[in-house]
């Protein structure tokens, strides 16, 4: 029984710690309670995905997958909460940022291990790029797939989408109207 | 832009980066008005971002009048920052959980609580002194490393690597990375590059601070292992 509990904890502790750390970070970023909690759920999701990727894959790849998951989650939550997605994204990707890689790069270079330092540094840089690319992919998927889907269902009125194409087009309409009035 | 269009301005154009803002639009008389602002002090407050976005959306869809919007704007500007106690508490907990996340044991976590709190205090002080961001990150990285090494030196057998990493996660430029890539994807290449540079500089500053202290520590106390 105890062993089973320990095994469950071993799986859950990563997401749990990531969520708790992110909660603290979002307080530092000025988020209010509900949004902070939602952001830390995103972090937990990201870390779960990262853990779930087999260890054969590189850190960069698992970070990429985690960032895609976190990004999609942020876009979805943002839609329901009528907030910009950045609000959730910014806090919940913090655990994925290669702070450790940054540190070990410096440590190796201080120790005089230039080649090791370069190797770790490249991995850290790739991880950072992977996280960024993952978010970009999530953003694009949201724009191309999810947003039309939601507008089709009519769950959100066009005026309520966040920074969406709907708003931009209605804005363009306004400008055209004005021009016609003046003419 | 949508605000201007909804308020009767024509041909709104905007160019925003994280160091400056340029905005121009034609009024109803056809004259072009423009605003240019240099941005010197940046700070992170997601709640402000969120309220501003809500306000802009409401104004653009005519759900809010101009007067309501400008009083909301004042309210957002006057919004209180987190108290120092909240920041220090969050710093302590954040450092603790990130230390645990990266494999810290209870002793490392305890040290991270203290160092995280001290780091947040220091960062608040740097902000008050208007220290440039680069120097603040440099000093923050140095402080985190120095404190961990000092705790280890005092006889507590902590794993300094894990503790330092947990603590510096509080300063890591996640925001800049996120926004840089979003800007670039949206086609705002210049704004994206500016943000990317910000991210890179912050990362370089933090690790230079940490590395400088490590090098100095080895030089001054050559016999003492980490």
Image (cartoon, coloured by chain):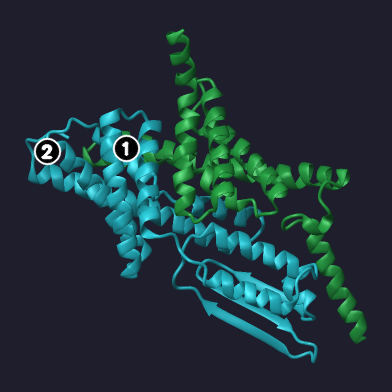
Q: Quadrant of residue B94?
A: top left
Rendered-image quadrant of the C terminus of chain B:
top left
Q: Quadrant of the N terminus of chain B?
A: bottom right
Mark identifier at residue A104: 1
Give the colour of chain A.
green
The chain to which mark 1 is attached is A
Residue B150 versus residue B41 in the image, above or below: above
- Residue corresponding to mark 2: B154
Q: Horizontal placement of B195 versus A115: left or right?
A: right
Residue at image position (31%, 46%) is B116
Compared with A28, A60 (above or below) is above
What's the colour of chain B in the image? cyan
Q: Secondary structure at mark 1?
A: helix
Point out residue B98 in the picture as x, y percentages from the top left corner: 39, 37
Residue at the spot x=78%, y=57% of the render? A160
Label 1 environment density (alpha carbons within 10 Å; few <14, some 14–19, many ≥20): many
Residue A180 position, x and y percent, is: 92, 80
Q: Which mark is residue B52?
A: none
Distance between the alpha carbons at the discs numbered 2 and 1: 23 Å
Taking A121 as reference, is B66 left or right? right
Residue A28 place in picture, x, y as percent: 44, 53
Judge by depth and name the residue closer to the eye, B35 or B86.
B86
Q: Tell me if mark 2 has few (under 14), some (14-19) or many (20+) residues whose alpha carbon lies within 10 angstroms of its own.
A: few
């Amino acid at each position: 029984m105890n062993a089973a509990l320990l095994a469950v904890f071993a799986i859950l502790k990563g997401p749990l710690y990531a969520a708790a750390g992110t909660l603290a970070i979002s307080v530092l970023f000025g988020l209010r309670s509900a949004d902070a909690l939602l952001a830390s759920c995103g972090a937990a999701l990201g870390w779960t995905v990262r853990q779930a990727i087999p260890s054969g894959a590189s850190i960069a790849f698992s970070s990429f997958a985690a960032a895609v998951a976190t990004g999609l989650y942020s876009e979805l939550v943002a839609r329901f909460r009528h907030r910009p997605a950045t609000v959730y994204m910014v806090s919940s990707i913090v655990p994925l940022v290669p702070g450790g890689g940054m540190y070990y790069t410096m440590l190796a270079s201080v120790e005089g291990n230039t080649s090791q330092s370069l190797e770790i540094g490249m991995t850290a840089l790739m991880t950072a790029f992977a996280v960024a690319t993952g978010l970009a992919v999530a953003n694009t998927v949201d724009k191309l797939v999810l947003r039309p889907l939601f507008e089709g269902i009519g769950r959100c009125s066009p005026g309520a989408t966040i920074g969406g194409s709907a708003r931009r087009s209605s804005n363009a309409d306004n400008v055209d109207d004005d021009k016609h009035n003046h003419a | 832009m949508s605000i201007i269009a909804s308020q009767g301005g024509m041909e709104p154009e905007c160019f925003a980066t994280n160091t400056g803002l340029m905005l121009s639009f034609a009024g109803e008389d056809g004259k072009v008005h423009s605003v240019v602002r240099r941005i010197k002090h940046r700070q992170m407050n997601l709640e402000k971002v969120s309220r501003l976005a809500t306000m802009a959306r409401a104004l653009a869809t005519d759900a809010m009048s101009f007067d309501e919007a400008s009083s909301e704007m004042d309210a957002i500007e006057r919004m209180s920052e987190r108290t120092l106690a909240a920041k220090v508490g969050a710093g302590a907990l954040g450092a603790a959980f990130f230390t645990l996340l990266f494999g810290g044991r209870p002793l490392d976590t305890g040290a991270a609580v203290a160092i995280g709190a001290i780091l947040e205090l220091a960062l608040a002080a740097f902000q008050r002194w208007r220290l440039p961001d680069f120097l603040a990150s440099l000093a923050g990285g140095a402080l985190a490393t120095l404190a961990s090494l000092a705790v280890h030196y005092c006889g507590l057998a902590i794993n300094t690597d894990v503790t330092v990493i947990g603590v510096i996660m509080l300063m890591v430029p996640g925001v800049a990375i996120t926004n840089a890539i979003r800007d670039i994807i949206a086609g705002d290449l210049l704004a994206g590059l500016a943000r990317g540079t910000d991210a890179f500089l912050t990362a370089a500053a933090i690790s230079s601070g940490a590395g400088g202290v490590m090098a100095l520590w080895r030089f001054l106390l050559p016999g003492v292992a980490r």
